[in-house]
Amino acid sequence: MSEVLTHVADNPAAPHAVSVAGADRSGRGKAVLVTVLKSALALVFGLPLLFMIVSSFKPDTQIFADLGGIRAFLPVGDIGLDNYTGVFDRVPFAQFLFNSVFISVATVVGGLVVNSMAAFVLARMRFRGQKVLLAVILATLIVPFEVMALPLLWEVNLLPYFDGVEFSQGWLDTYAVQIVPFIANAFSIFLFYQYFDTIPKELDEAAMIDGAGWFRIYRSVIMPLSGPAIATVAILTFLPAWNQYLWPLMVTQSEAVRPAMVGIDYFRQLNVSWGQLMAYASVITVPVLVLFIAFQRSFVNSIASSGVKG
Amino acid sequence: MKSSIRRRLTVSAAVVTATTLLLTGCAKGGGSSSSGEDGTITLWTHNAGNAGELGAIQTIVDDFNASGSGYTVDLQAFPQDSYNQSVTAAAAAKKLPCIMDIDGPNVPNWAWAGYLAPLEGMDEELSDYLPTTIGKYDDKIYSYGFYDVSLVMVSRQSILDENGIRTPTIDQPWTKDEFSDALAKLKASGKYEYPADFQTGSTGEWWPYAYSPFLQSSGGDLIDRDDYKSADGVLNGPEAVEWATWFRGLAANGDIALKSGSDPTQAFANGKTGILYSGSWTAVPLRKAFDDTVFLPTVDLGQGPKIGGGSWQWGMSATCDNPEAASAYMKFAAQDEYVAKVATDTNNIPTTPGAAAEVPGFEDGGENDIFRQYAQEYAVLRPVTPGYPFIATTFTKAAQDILNGADPQAVLDQATKDIDANQQQNNYFQ
């Protein structure tokens, strides 16, 4: 100890060295703490997913026998693919998956076009009542869907429907009824509006001098510069479209147009098939997981930007 | 310039095609109309994912379609968990199918709301059906069911014997004291976290279906059945308070969980409880789990054991535009042959004696005959009033509050007040 003190006294830089060492130690401690906290958070969010996947390979009796211990998260015991076979026997899985993919993708594509156009008009063009219109659109965000569900049901039931051959009344039990009401979205318009607002107006003026009209400016100038906003809106539209439950429950009557989320109820009979339910949940989570892993960076950025900006 | 026009045309055509596809969604699913012009009517069932019952219903539909009646039935299956919401939404849109199944206690409400049409001219076909499987409102028949189910106390003979617990019979069920004694013995054995599982974690209709029979066994009821106008005196009288005190005592003593696990049947199969209060639908999995499973009568709290009566039933919608076809199907399906078919495939209690003789296990002395006997001896219909859905949710809340330790008299007085107010506000559903 005395050696250290002597060494410190002899060295003018020593106090600094001590503080740097201390800072290093406290920095390391902080980093360890952050890592531990992050790991704990990862476990909190990851364990249910792990439990779902592991349980999907176990028979019902074993799922419950393993509850309350670490075995619940381990692929041990009577492991097999029976639950997955059961899922494919019990629900028209391919049909449900196709329906969900079709509905989600159509909603995303439609949403990107319609909402970006609306936002373009609000952000780039000038007309009387522009701000009021934007405020009215944003005000619709405070109305929850559950409040609108019944009036919307009545409305779509009165709309004329063309099935390619003839007209009839009502949109119930169609893909359209699950897609069209969700294309125009105030939040998506707001996200596009915010992004478009940051693009210099001089670009519009330059394009106009070159003879471009508003649509050309939207298509050839603004949209090509809006990759991050497009990714954000695409992801934030896809997730709720994929997870839709209440609305399809109300408007679909046949399996031909029923989405995968409603299919989960097929396993909740008097004697619930927990293993099959976990297998089904695992299978319908895969597309979302793949999407998440593929667009992880955009997804995180989109959540961050939509939460922080504005 | 030309290529620009061509490109614009191509884009426009693509947009128009995509929009058309999007809007039309290729085609309708096929389930949105109650009846087609070609004599096709739609039938809805709550059995999506339930292979046994769905298969049996499909057999009836196929047989009817092949019977040469001139009508065709198109079956649409919905998952049970969300079936009522789907029907209510369809009713709001005036798009009910011609034929649908209904949970028994909802029949008066759906009949009053105008969803259902009375079944005319079926008295003969339904003459020997169990009374609990006929849905009536305002002296008219609105529905019939192929089966009923029975509430039971499930245990294992070895558990009863090891703990010196008497095996109750239909003639001599457990009394309240005997049941308390049995629970005390199971608790003393130290083998179970809770001696009994009353499925208190279940939600929805389970609460009035499973726990109001105990109220009735104590001498109380959900509403005065003389005129269905008030619950005063029956839901908050001394007998009802006695039931509530007993019910709360089960949880307070640690005899049952305040909120049992998500699958009590599996918990019993894994040896976590000694007695399971459940239904005849557990017979198949629990006989498979143990070779000494016993299905016992429920407890007699003073007025004899009681169990809820009425399961899923079939009716015709009031908005069906081909009632002749619907009526033809309803008569066709009411035959013993189909009652037996559905009861066999679901392992439930067949509604007619003729069908019972054909269903393995339900013949006299068969292993499932006991369920039919319980249904005949103990079943009490849930109140036959359109106000039942409100009564059911009010009772559920009251029972949950009581189990959680609220004052029984205060809770039951409030529930009575709420039910009376609802009946009155709706002019007693007249």
Image: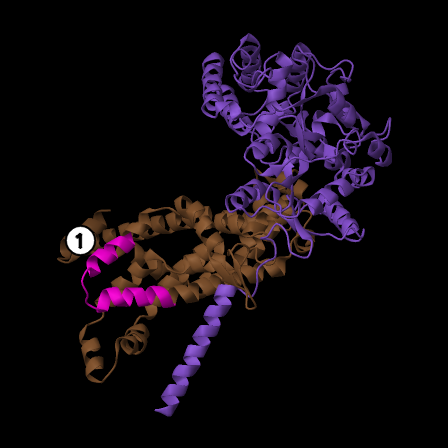
Chain colours: A brown, B purple
Task: Check residue A127 for magenta coloring.
Answer: yes
Q: Which residue is found at the position 86% from the left and 32% from the top?
A: B357
**Residue on which the image places disc 1:** A8
Would you place residue A75 above or below residue B234 in this image? below
Would you place residue B393 above or below residue B97 in this image? above
Residue B157 x, y percent position in the rendering? 77, 24
Q: Which residue is found at the position 52% from the left and 21% from the top?
A: B403
Q: Which residue is found at the position 20% from the left and 53% from the top?
A: A18
Crowdedness of circle 1 by 10 Å Cα count: few (<14), some, many (20+)?
Answer: some
Q: Nearer the viewer, residue A167 or B20?
A: A167
Q: Nearer the viewer, residue B418 or A123?
A: B418
- In the image, taking residue A21 as reference, residue A58 lies left or right, namely right
Would you place residue B7 above or below residue B203 in this image? below
Q: Nearer the viewer, residue A3 or B186?
A: B186
Specify whether residue B150 is in view: no
**Which stretch appears magenta?**
A113-138
Residue B295 x, y percent position in the rendering? 75, 26
